[in-house]
Amino acid sequence: MTQRVLVTAGAGGIGKEVARAFAAQGAKVCVCDIDAPALEAAAKEIPGLVPLVCDVSKRPDIERMVAAAAEALGGLDVLVNNAGIAGPTASVEEVDPEQWEAVMTIDVIGTFHVTRLAIPHLKQSAAGSIVIMSSVGGRFGYPNRSAYCVAKMGLIGFAKTLSRELGRYGIRCNAIAPGAVGGERIERVLQGRADAEHKTLEEERTAAMSIQSVKRFVDPKDIASLIVFLTSDAGKSISGQILPIDNDAQTSAY
Ligand SMILES: NC(=O)c1ccc[n+]([C@@H]2O[C@H](COP(=O)([O-])OP(=O)(O)OC[C@H]3O[C@@H](n4cnc5c(N)ncnc54)[C@H](O)[C@@H]3O)[C@@H](O)[C@H]2O)c1
């Protein structure tokens, strides 16, 4: 079976690696993203990729995008809800409420709308599967990242609910919880923490490694491999789970 796959926010970062891994398996892949030039570049890099511009904070954009993706792919077997912003680094008392709400709008409400609209298409699939991107922050709380923690913990509840609701239609849903992933984003997050804590970037990097058994950042390719496995026939008995991929992080606070 040729899988028909939609990856949100797939023009860069982890999402692009996920799109690349599915395409390498022979899947038909559509990615949406807010960044049109990055989408164009991704479409050049990954043969056959269907790029769609969409801001997942905007419901009309999502409505157009999901319909266009299902049409371009001829249906939908796999939805990878990857879109999510890291949000502000500040205490609950001091955080900018607009920035806090923006995290809910993109990470939680955006995931809800994409999924809601994808379900009718997934029901037509012989092997529908949804993956939701949580985080190590969705398993442990940590200071100064309340919006992200709330969003990523909420998404675990969403994944478990979807698994219970959709199992009867043969649709599986799992959440994955990556730890600190190598790449540009982690550099921004570490810099934010360093600024908030009045530390250097190197001090933050050392602190980040101190909470993991395996002392390296997660390779985005490994996350892509996990998602390809979970949504494949080999993963057909796995649903309603949270799968950490985090080099054995014992906490997300340090
Ligand atoms: N990088 C990490 O360390 C890490 C760890 C755990 C979980 N995650 C989660 O993995 C997912 C991807 O993270 P990443 O590091 O690849 O992200 P990233 O910051 O590299 O961004 C990936 C893509 O999201 C797009 N995007 C941003 N806002 C958007 C919007 N409103 N609508 C559509 N697209 C939008 C960007 O244009 C970009 O192409 C997120 O949900 C994130 O929370 C990341």
Image: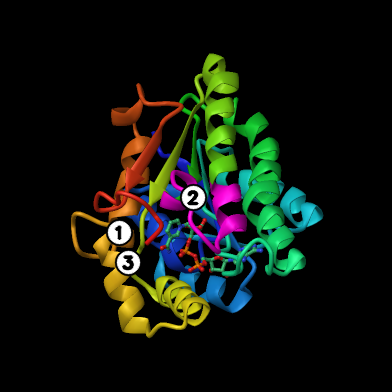
Circle on res. 208: 3
Pointer 2 or 3: first along the chain: 2
Distance from the alpha carbon under mark 1 to that under mark 3? 20 Å
Q: Position of residue 226 (x, y in %)?
A: 32, 45
| Residue shown at the point (38%, 85%) measured from the top left | 200
| Residue shown at the point (44%, 43%) measured from the top left | 139
| Residue shown at the point (71%, 44%) measured from the top left | 113
Q: Is residue 162 left or right of residue 138?
A: right
The span shown in magenta is 136-152
Q: Position of residue 152 (x, y in %)?
A: 54, 48
Residue assigned mark 2: 141
Q: Position of residue 205 (x, y in %)?
A: 31, 74
Amino acid marked by disc 2? Gly
Q: Quadrant of residue 9?
A: bottom right
Residue assigned mark 1: 221
Q: Is residue 138 left or right of residue 119?
A: left
Amino acid marked by disc 1? Lys
- The residue sitting at the top extreme is 168
Q: Viewer-proximal residue, 183 or 233? A: 183
Amino acid marked by disc 3? Ala
